[in-house]
Image (tube, helix red, strand yellow):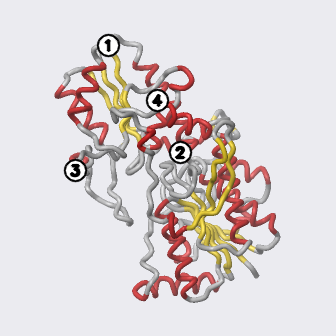
């Protein structure tokens, strides 16, 4: 028997199940894999031997299409950090590889972001250490678009489409009154501001965009922010600001840190929120006009009703390519995207070395940020725009979308 296993990890997206579908499709079509196990709750499911047979769970084209248009991680997720693949971590890896051998698993696929790629990298390092022939391949996923060695990440395009649409709609809403007001939109992004940059995409279509866009790539100054807003209020009544949750001052302190719990996840990342609310209170105190903050939160990663067709199609393709890499003998690699051109948009799948991907962060280039550090350039938006193209629609029942649910 030659079997494979796939898991999903980290924060979900609207396209993560499309990559899962791509893995299932390619494993089945290869004719070289007897059983494809789905590991519930990521790597934790392997420790627990909590699996399902995905060839049975997703039996036909209708099931595939439904899965591809369902948000979140159908297999469940986790944020479990593996120890270093050395003598101190030997007990953990010995147990995992005993389970792999028990179930005759020869191929391992893990769909996730930075921390998930760290997991795949560690497993491949241990496999090399013990001369295991199991192939370990990472499948990229993150709305943050901050993975290295790939042009962009699956899930980003759909999140970008939702954010650009929602921000344009909010701007329309704020324009109906003549009372001076400031609306602050807090958008996900701990270290990279790609998502926040997307808030301005509609600028290329009808000129609609936030007045100011602040990213974590540059130091945030409260005084400069207040000065920006005061100056803008001299010529218009309604000011809209988009800000990354991870903006920090020149000392590296999160702007919203005073309102945050200080708690961290298994990988040491602080749980962030409250940046918009903090800035709301500052505007109220120092300017005194009407002000509100909007935290979009998880809506930007689970709004599959507004997915990008480009994103869904590419997510399926990269899942399939991951299987091609494994079957060709590759290991310790991540399936990635390589952009051939932007106009016209042409992108192809490529192989990336996990040793250079794990734990690295790909930031928005400084040339994509205006000299004033309070907005993004048109060049930035032109780079993002191809990723939000095309519309897909899930099956509807009683007026509501139907989701593909795998019982865990």
Whole-percent x and y of residue 230?
25, 21
The quarter of the picture where residue 45 lies is bottom right
Q: Earlier in the sequence, mark 2 or mark 1?
A: 1
**CA separation, marks 4 and 3?**
30 Å
Disc 3 designates what residue?
251
Q: Is residue 397 visible?
A: no
Disc 4 designates what residue?
167
Q: Residues within 10 Å of mark 3 (few under 14, many from 20)?
A: few
Q: Is residue 75 above or below residue 226?
A: below
Q: Nearer the viewer, residue 179 or 113?
A: 113
Q: Is residue 187 visible?
A: yes
Disc 2 designates what residue?
302
Q: Earlier in the sequence, mark 2 or mark 3?
A: 3
**CA separation, marks 1 and 3?**
33 Å
The quarter of the picture where residue 130 lies is bottom right
**Residue 235 bears which disc, if any?**
1
Question: Callout 3: helix, strand or loop?
Answer: loop
Identify which residue is drawn at 73% across, 59% down: 58
* Left-right relation of 61 to 160: right
Whole-percent x and y of residue 273?
33, 46
Question: Callout 1: helix, strand or loop?
Answer: loop
């Amino acid at each position: 028997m030659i079997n494979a296993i796939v898991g999903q990890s980290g924060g979900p997206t609207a396209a993560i199940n499309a990559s899962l579908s791509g893995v299932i499709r390619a494993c089945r079509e290869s004719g070289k894999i007897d059983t494809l196990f789905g590991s519930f709750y990521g790597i934790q499911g392997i420790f627990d031997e909590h699996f399902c047979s995905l060839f049975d769970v997703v039996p036909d084209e209708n099931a595939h299409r439904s899965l591809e248009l369902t948000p979140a991680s159908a297999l469940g997720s986790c944020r479990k950090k593996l120890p270093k693949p050395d003598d101190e971590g030997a007990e953990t890896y010995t147990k995992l590889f005993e389970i792999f051998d028990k179930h005759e698993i020869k191929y391992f696929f893990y769909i996730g972001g930075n921390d998930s790629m760290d997991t795949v990298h560690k497993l491949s390092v241990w496999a090399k250490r013990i001369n295991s022939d199991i192939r370990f391949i990472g499948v990229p996923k993150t709305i943050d678009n901050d993975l290295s060695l790939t042009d962009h990440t699956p899930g980003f395009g759909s999140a970008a489409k939702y954010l650009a649409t929602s921000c344009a709609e909010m701007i329309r809403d704020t324009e109906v009154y003549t009372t001076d007001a400031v609306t602050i939109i807090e958008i996900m992004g701990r270290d990279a501001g790609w998502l926040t940059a997307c808030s301005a995409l509609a600028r290329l279509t009808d000129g609609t965009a936030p007045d100011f866009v602040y990213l974590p790539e540059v130091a945030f100054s409260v005084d400069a922010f207040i000065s920006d807003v005061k100056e803008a209020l001299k010529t218009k009544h309604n000011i809209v600001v988009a800000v990354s949750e991870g903006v920090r001052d020149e000392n590296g302190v999160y702007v919203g840190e005073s309102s945050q719990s200080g708690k961290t996840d298994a990988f040491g990342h602080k749980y962030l929120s409250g940046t918009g609310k903090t800035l709301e209170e500052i505007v109220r105190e120092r300017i005194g006009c009407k002000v509100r903050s909007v935290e979009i939160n998880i809506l930007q990663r689970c709004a599959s009703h507004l997915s990008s067709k480009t994103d869904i199609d590419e997510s399926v393709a990269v899942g399939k390519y991951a299987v091609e890499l494994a079957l060709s003998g590759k290991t310790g690699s991540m399936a990635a995207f390589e952009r051939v051109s932007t106009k016209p948009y042409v992108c192809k799948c490529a192989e990336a070395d996990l040793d250079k991907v794990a734990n690295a962060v790909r930031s928005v280039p400084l040339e994509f940020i205006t000299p004033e550090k309070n907005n993004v350039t048109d060049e930035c938006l032109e780079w993002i725009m191809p990723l939000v193209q095309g519309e897909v629609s899930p099956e509807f029942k009683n007026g509501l979308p139907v989701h593909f649910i795998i019982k865990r």
